[in-house]
Amino acid sequence: MNKVLPKPKAVADTVSSSPRPAVGVLSPCATDAPVQKSKIVVADDSRVYRTLVKSVLAQKGNEVVFARNGLEALKAVAEHQPSLVITDWEMPDITGIELCRQIRLEQEFYTYIVLLTSNTDKDQVIEGLAAGADDYLTKPFHSGELVARIGVGRRVVDLHRQIQKKNTLLQELALTDPLTSLPNRRAIEDWTTRELNGAARHGFAFWIAVADLDHFKSVNDHHGHDAGDVVLKRFADLLRANTRSSNMCGRTGGEEFILGVTHVEKEGIQTAIERIRQQFEAERFSFGDKVMGVTASFGIAGFRGKQAPKFDELLRNADEALYRAKRGGRNRLEFSLR
Ligand code: GH3
Ligand code: MG
Ligand code: MG
Ligand code: MG
């Protein structure tokens, strides 16, 4: 049976109150950082209470990290990314309230915070909840109640993390072309806008190459839409394989693709696109009893200077070059004259 645990003697068990330096404690956490779900950080300057909480939580197989003051707790939270924090109200350096505020300010992942306090004063409870605590328990606490409240905390944190994961997935989907898994037009526009500003600031060259498959409609017309999709995916794979991690390629729509390349001169981009053109030309597709090839035309536009153009402007220039490549016989690349 669960018992109400005795109120410990004050002061006797208090360990060192000298605060640790806070520098570097709160390094911001990336949302995709590994989350150790089962961890609980317990902050209390009373050794007796730390022992009491430990005895209750250990029974349930929880992984518990103890902190003897607020700054230690902040460090432990940043390091362990716990699901739950159980914190004392009064501590020698910063209070549980301040700890709540700091956690809410700094941590990107959700941590469920239970204030463990001798305070029964309702105003202080309100202050604690307003500071970011999710729940509170008064000392001396009932062991069963602590376990039950931690169970509630876990459910809330699990939900938060599921939502966070789904949001990340939705964000990715919103920026990804479903057929080829390449970045879509929006993602490319975001990336290009950022890179263009960087190119203007740091004076490096920036190029975009647009690609359009030649006579692609006839692939669909003669071999069906699924065959067309196979060709699109193959072209996407080829683009991907020819794109360095610092550059970007994507599908802007239909049978149109784009490549963004930085830090190369005109000869460099020409060689890179020519390689892609040749590799694609050499690909063979088997549809039914027919083996065939498909080609692509390319238009390239670049920028180097102090005043970054808009993405649309650069795209217009590249499209104009692409149009000349089409008119010039297809399966070739042209540079923008602007
Ligand atoms: P050009 O050489 O002048 O570019 O001729 P084209 O036939 O490639 O150009 P057009 O714009 O006439 O046709 C593009 C075709 O691309 C028409 C459309 O059905 C097809 N298409 C667009 N999106 C998809 C897709 O997701 N899958 C497949 N299979 N076909 C697509
Ligand atoms: Mg205390
Ligand atoms: Mg087209
Ligand atoms: Mg086309």
Image: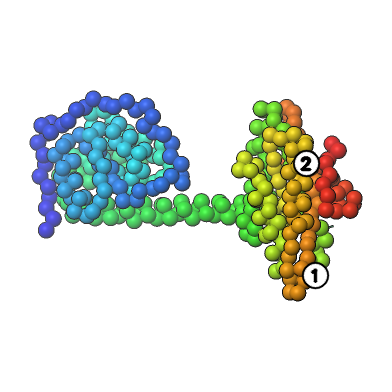
Q: Quadrant of the C terminus?
A: top right
Taking the view exactly as shown, the residue that stands out farthest to the right is 328
**x and y percent of residue 322 in the render?**
83, 48
> Element type at marker 2?
helix
Q: Which residue does the numbered mark 2 point to in the structure image?
A: 270
Mark 2 residue's CB less than 8 Å from ligand 1: no
Residue 126, can we see it?
A: no
Q: Determine crowd level at label 1: few under 14, some 14-19, many 20+ residues with C-alpha closer than 10 A.
A: few
The location of residue 90, given as percent across then percent down, is 23, 33
> Given the image, on which type of amino acid does mark 1 rest?
Asp
Residue contact between numbered discs 2 and 1, judged by CB atoms under 8 Å? no
Q: Quadrant of residue 217?
A: bottom right
Q: Residue at x 46, y 51 (%)?
A: 164
Which quarter of the picture shows residue 216? bottom right
Task: In the rendered view, tell whether residue 166 sits above or below residue 107.
Answer: below
Position above or below: 102 against 137: above
Asked whether the viewer can see residue 202, the reply is yes
Q: Earlier in the sequence, mark 2 or mark 1?
A: 1
Looking at the image, is mark 2 or mark 1 nearer the viewer?
Answer: 2
Q: In 3D space, how far apart are the residues under numbered discs 2 and 1 (Cα atoms)?
A: 32 Å
Q: Nearer the viewer, residue 59 or 49?
A: 59
Location of residue 295 in the rendering, given as x and y in whole percent from the top left corner:
79, 57
Give the secondary structure at mark 1.
Answer: helix
Q: Nearer the viewer, residue 112 or 83?
A: 83
If the image is split into quadrants, where does the N terminus sit? Answer: bottom left
- Tell me the kind of residue under disc 2: Gln
* Residue at image mark 1: 221
Q: Position of residue 223 (x, y in %)?
A: 76, 71
Q: Nearer the viewer, residue 1 or 124?
A: 1
Say which quarter of the image contains residue 226: bottom right
